[in-house]
Amino acid sequence: MGCPPLSRTSRCLALTTLVTLAGAPFLTGCEKGEAKTALSYTADSKRAYDEAMIEFSAHNWLEAQALMREVKRKYSYSKYARLAELRIADADFEQDKFAEAIRGYRQFVHDHRSDVDEVSYARSRIAESQYAQISESFLLPTADERDQAVIIDAFKELKSYVHDYPNAKESKKIRELLADVTARLMRHELYVARFYLQRDNFDAAVLRIQYAMRTFAGGPSIREPAPSDPIDSGLEAEALLLLGEVYLKMHKFGDARESFAVLLRDYPKSPLTVQATNYLTYMKDRGV
């Protein structure tokens, strides 16, 4: 006895099932192909980046940059494209092409703000590049007489980094650079103040010292500084002593006394405490 004939609906369902089953291997094959393609893309981008790093590590900067640009072009959606951007800027930095390096790092920060660690690194390199652009002449004593624009730019960049990333691994080095730049700027202001003092322009001298203390002075030296504290230029005690001396010449004895007292209180280890104490004794003996 034969099987009963299938209804039209049953025949349609059976046909649909057969088609689905027949197509299943092809669908699975597509999924595997897509996964394989993604894996290959990542592997290929890493391989290309590693090859570029061989040239980078050998200090073949131009060859390394050319290969890194290929990584960016061919694998723009991979993390290695972002790393390649940083290495291109690094190569400029290593060649003392600081303006080009700064442009590269700034572009990276602009384009990849969510990459926290890489952005922190890029900003530290911007700060280092700004510092590196200070010419050798600024390292000499006569730098006190020169235009401070380049140092001001470095100061702002370094200070901004320390403020935003006080605990980053690059912060220790950046703080050292900032301390050096801060001291140079502080020294320049004190030089100008002495220039005015020698010409009996006492008000101008006071304004320059006050500006230096307000803008570049660190905190008291009687405790260990926290990472977020202002940078100590090492010249704060000198500035306070000079300010007191100017006030003495102006016969503003109360202001002079306060300046010397702050020096003794905040910078007790400074050798200038001896002079400050002598000035206070001098005023006390004369009843002023």
Image (tube, rainbow, N blue to C red):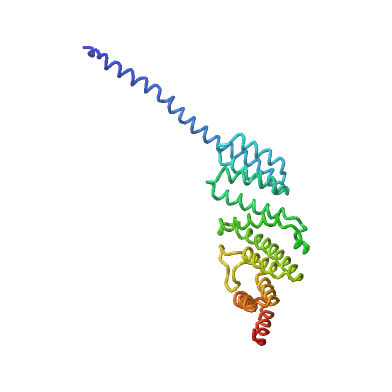
Q: Residue furthest left?
A: 1
- Residue sitting nearer the eye, 48 or 77: 77
> In the rendered picture of this protein, how many numbered marks are placed on residues?
0
Quadrant of the image occupied by residue 271:
bottom right
> Taking 253 as reference, is 160 above or below it?
above
> Taking 209 as reference, is 155 above or below it?
above
Residue 155 pos. (x, y %): 65, 57
Residue depicted at x 67% and y 57%:
152
Residue 270 pos. (x, y %): 66, 76
Residue depicted at x 58% and y 36%:
76
- Residue sitting nearer the eye, 117 or 24: 117
Q: In the displayed structure, does residue 281 sit left or right of residue 139?
A: left
Q: Is residue 236 visible?
A: yes
Q: Residue furthest bottom?
A: 285
Quadrant for the N terminus in the image? top left
Residue depicted at x 69% and y 43%:
55
Quadrant of the image occupied by residue 222:
bottom right
- Residue sitting nearer the eye, 14 or 141: 141
Residue 12 pos. (x, y %): 30, 16
Q: Is residue 271 visible?
A: no
Quadrant of the image occupied by residue 75:
top right
Quadrant for the C terminus in the image? bottom right
Residue 180 pos. (x, y %): 68, 62
Residue depicted at x 73% and y 66%:
191
